[in-house]
């Protein structure tokens, strides 16, 4: 029962010690000579450094088991504005039992299907403070003993992510479509480079500048709200030059000293190349040099397409990938070890897909999410930063979620969006030079090709992945009738409004109200990540009941005023919950922490086994909003994952679900329908139209 409740609590995701490696850092001179001659370069950046700005770390490699405390010394070592407030951040609070019951109960009662269920939950909540008294005391003691961290973070990182055995792709990873670069020349106007090479070179320039600022600590600290509250920067250490490493039972993270590595990984046609993209002073290489390097990788990959597509191994169940990784190392020896370490120590991965996707939104979604059946071989799903560059020059960011949440990744996405090809090309002279490039698996390829065990295992991994792809579907939508500006003019909180849209759409999809959540940011606390913000309330129940299972675009003034009043009340209720959750006073992480402290054979509080409690945690709608609309999978087989962004004059959203459920496209249609219907309520003139 304890394992069951722990598993239940981990589904709330919007989804140890370290030791120094005994190995020496991987020196670049251990790799092949460059595929083309290299010349000394200078950065095209207007903020180019003339000396090294990134300090060497005390150790070349740090291995993390998910406890932010164990790597905190790196923040002090790096220093700078990015980590300047870490010692001043407050600790995540432990809510009282009464507070959490008060938060929880209104979110669960609307989901009751009988008076008997309702009465049972009320009794369980009444008994909870006494039944959970010892658990609360243990949790408070844990919090008091962790003066340098959050009582939650290690549990959350480990159980919510690193111990999850499902494939990270689809189940954990997320993506953001990035803005198009309208200044890119057409492919026919470029004599030397393809669109992926040009756009990829721009992205690498942005990542290089981001890397210099983050790894030197000079990146400005994030601040929130009108009071400019500082946010925890711990996650930034796990963003660059890092990698999730599969182990049986529990994965780990590896962090590599950025001062020792100047390379990114370029993936094309299932092959992987290590390419330097910064100079000796950590400045980005000139645009034309990066462009030449990426185009060379494309040409080399096209001319040698019979190489084993080892990136597929990262799509497996984590225990299987751990075993297969050991197989690769046993068969490939030191050459394979060096190859894997080259990928693990890289700043980021640039995934170049030469085939141009169609212009239809739904057609390029799968490529961003998992690579589909044509470009998955160009991925290494253990890396926190992967930039997917399509044949038509479109970009997406793909992230591994274990140690880094969505908000910090927005900073590098913003950098990439800001860097335009025309701007860089006008600042940089054309060059025939090439960066230092090596084929990552070159020395181990023959060993892999001659191993029947590896070949057979790889074919099974590919089949399993293709089955996983078939089991999931996604739709990407852009609703352009209105956006954030319209809602602000109507004095409606945009995010809370969108949550009511999702509630109405899901009410009509499932024929009843279901559990919905969105994550709230709690990085105002030291080592804080997210808290669950429950969207269901008595007010939202009254709203969806009044709106009904079928839309009504033309209603009389009395009905309109009634519905609009209920909508505003539901929006206010959700905004109130969001405010509490952002202060660390949501109920779900608290319940999770209490469940973690149950002793063997100890009686569990009745509440945790209550059917209505479990239904309120069965997230049939898992939602999230960010400035770049996120795409991610559902957390339960009969539910949807929906990411959204309210732009000034439009709403972008992405819906994912299991294929067998057949609900992703239907839910997308219902969201659009609800958006139209609610505009009619808000805008009287719309009714006449």
Image: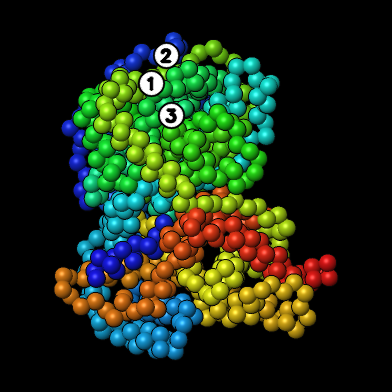
Task: Say which element carries label 2.
Answer: loop
Is disc 1 surrounded by few (<14), some (14 to 19) or many (20+) residues within 10 Å?
A: many
Can you say which quadrant of the picture contains the C terminus?
bottom right
Task: Say which element carries label 1.
Answer: strand
Q: Is residue 76 above or below residue 23?
A: below
The answer to whether residue 226 is left or right of residue 233 is: right
Disc 1 versus disc 2: distance between alpha carbons? 8 Å
- Disc 1 marks which residue? 439
Disc 2 versus disc 3: distance between alpha carbons? 18 Å
Image location (x, y in percent) of residue 297: 47, 21
Is disc 3 surrounded by few (<14), some (14 to 19) or many (20+) residues within 10 Å?
A: many
For discs 3 and 1, the disc positioned in front in the rendered view:
3
- Disc 2 marks which residue? 35
Image location (x, y in percent) of residue 94: 32, 70
For discs 2 and 3, the disc positioned in front in the rendered view:
3
- Disc 3 marks which residue? 270
Q: Counting residues from the N terminus, which is met first, the one under dot 1 or under dot 2? A: 2
């Amino acid at each position: 029962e304890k394992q069951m409740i722990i598993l239940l609590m981990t589904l709330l995701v919007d989804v140890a010690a370290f030791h120094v490696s005994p190995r020496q850092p991987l020196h670049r001179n251990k790799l092949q000579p460059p595929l083309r001659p290299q010349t000394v370069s200078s950065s095209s950046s207007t903020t180019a450094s003339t000396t090294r700005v990134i300090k060497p770390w005390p150790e070349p490699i740090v291995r993390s088991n998910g406890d932010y405390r164990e790597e905190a010394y790196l923040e002090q070592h790096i220093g700078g504005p990015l980590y300047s407030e870490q010692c001043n951040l407050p600790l995540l609070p432990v809510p009282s039992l009464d507070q959490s019951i008060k938060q929880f109960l209104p979110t669960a009662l609307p989901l009751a299907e009988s008076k008997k269920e309702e009465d049972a939950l009320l009794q369980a909540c009444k008994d909870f403070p006494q039944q959970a008294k010892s658990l609360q005391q243990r949790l408070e003691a844990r919090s008091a003993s962790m003066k340098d961290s959050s009582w939650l973070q290690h549990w959350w990182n480990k159980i919510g992510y690193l111990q999850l055995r499902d494939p990270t792709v689809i189940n954990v990873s997320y993506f953001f479509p990035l803005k198009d670069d309208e200044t890119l020349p057409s492919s026919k106007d470029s004599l030397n480079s393809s669109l992926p090479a040009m756009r990829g070179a721009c992205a690498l320039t942005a990542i290089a500048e981001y890397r210099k600022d983050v790894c030197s600590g000079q990146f400005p600290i994030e601040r929130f709200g009108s009071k400019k509250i500082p946010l925890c920067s711990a996650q930034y250490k796990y963003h660059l030059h890092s990698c999730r490493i599969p182990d049986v039972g529990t994965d780990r993270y590896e962090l590599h000293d950025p001062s020792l590595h100047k390379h990114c990984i370029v993936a094309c046609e299932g092959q992987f190349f290590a390419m330097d993209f910064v100079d000796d002073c950590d400045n980005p290489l000139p645009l034309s040099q990066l462009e030449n390097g990426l185009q060379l990788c494309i040409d080399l990959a096209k001319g040698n397409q019979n190489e084993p597509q080892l990136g597929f191994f990262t799509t497996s169940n984590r225990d299987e990938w751990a075993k297969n990784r050991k197989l690769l190392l046993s068969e490939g020896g030191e050459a394979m070890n060096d190859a894997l370490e080259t990928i693990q120590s890289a700043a980021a991965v640039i995934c170049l897909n030469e085939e141009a996707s169609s212009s239809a939104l739904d057609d390029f979604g799968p490529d961003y999410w998992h690579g589909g059946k044509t470009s998955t071989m160009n991925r290494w799903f253990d890396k926190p930063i992967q930039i997917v560059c399509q044949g038509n020059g479109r970009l997406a960011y793909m992230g591994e979620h274990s140690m880094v949440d969505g908000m910090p990744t927005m900073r590098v996405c913003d950098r990439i969006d800001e860097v335009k090809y025309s701007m860089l090309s006008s600042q940089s002279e054309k060059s025939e030079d090439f960066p230092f490039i090596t084929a990552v698996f070159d020395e181990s390829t023959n060993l892999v090709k001659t191993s029947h065990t590896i070949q057979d295992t790889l074919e099974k991994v590919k089949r399993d992945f293709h089955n996983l792809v078939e089991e999931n579907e996604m739709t990407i939508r852009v609703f352009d009738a209105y956006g954030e500006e319209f809602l602000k003019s109507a004095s409606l909180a945009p995010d809370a409004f969108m949550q009511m849209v999702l509630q109405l759409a899901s009410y009509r999809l499932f024929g009843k109200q279901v559990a919905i959540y969105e994550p709230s940011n709690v990085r105002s606390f030291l080592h804080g990540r997210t808290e669950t913000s429950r969207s269901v309330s008595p007010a939202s129940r009254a709203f969806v009941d009044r709106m009904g299972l079928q839309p009504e675009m033309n209603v009389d003034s009395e009905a309109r005023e009634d519905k609009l009043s209920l909508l505003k009340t539901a929006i206010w209720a959700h905004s109130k919950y969001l405010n509490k959750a952002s202060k660390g006073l949501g109920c779900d992480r608290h319940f999770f922490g209490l469940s973690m402290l149950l002793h063997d054979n100890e009686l569990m509080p009745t509440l945790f086994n209550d059917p209505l409690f479990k239904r309120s945690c069965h997230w049939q709608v898992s939602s999230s909003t960010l400035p770049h609309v996120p795409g991610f999978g559902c957390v339960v087989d009969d539910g949807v994952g929906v990411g959204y962004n309210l732009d000034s004059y439009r709403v972008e959203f992405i819906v994912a679900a299991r294929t067998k459920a057949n609900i992703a496209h239907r839910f997308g249609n219902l969201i659009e329908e609800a958006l139209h219907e609610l505009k009619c309520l808000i805008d009287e003139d719309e009714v006449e139209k």
